[in-house]
Image: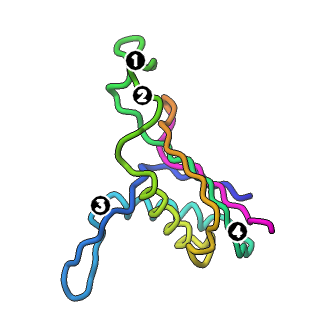
Amino acid sequence: MIEIRVNGLPAPQGSKRHVGGGRMVESSKKVKPWREAVAAETAKQQFPYMPYVQVAAWFLLPRPKGHYRTGRNAHLLKATAPHFPGKYPDLDKLCRSTLDALRMGGAYDDDAQVVRLHAYKVYAQYGDESGALIRLSDVHL
């Protein structure tokens, strides 16, 4: 198993728009830095050839400041703070951008090699950086 920790703001692979001349560009300006961060961390690893790949990814999203109390209790969550980030960004779109970046970083040759995907969208703990924890492993027959 290979584990990769990526710091940064996870960004979803959004829609593309046509800009003329057969060119398409990403609608989201956040996806390019995210893909580059994932690809850079991936490129630091040595990957054996894996014909079938399993990916587990935990997307650690920043918790809004409004979820925390104030004053000397600013590190504590309000009772009304949600447990999970059940809003934007969509989990499937986070997976799309990240799987593409893993390929760009050399984890595998083609996204089609990913035959198992476990993905989680959670809030980063107080004081921790947002990003992702990604584990890749070979699927044994």
* Residue 84 to residue 76: above or below: below
Identify the residue at horizontal 21%, vertical 88% (top origin): 21
In the rendered view, tell whether residue 10 sits above or below residue 107.
above
Query: Is 121 rendered above or below residue 32?
Result: above
CA gap, disc 3 and disc 1: 31 Å
Scheme of image coloration: rainbow
- Which stretch is magenta? 128-141
- Magenta-drawn stretch contains 97: no
Q: The residue under label 1 is which amino acid type?
A: Lys
Q: Position of residue 6 (x, y in %)?
A: 54, 52
Residue 110: horizontal and vertical position, in percent? 57, 77
Residue picked out by circle 3:
28
Question: How dense is the environment of label 1, judged by Cα within 10 Å: few (below 14), some, or many (20 and up)?
Answer: some
At numbered mark 2, what does the secondary structure look like: helix, strand or loop? Answer: loop
Label 1 – label 2 distance at C-alpha: 9 Å
What residue is disc 4 on?
A: 46
| Viewer-side label of 3, 2 | 2
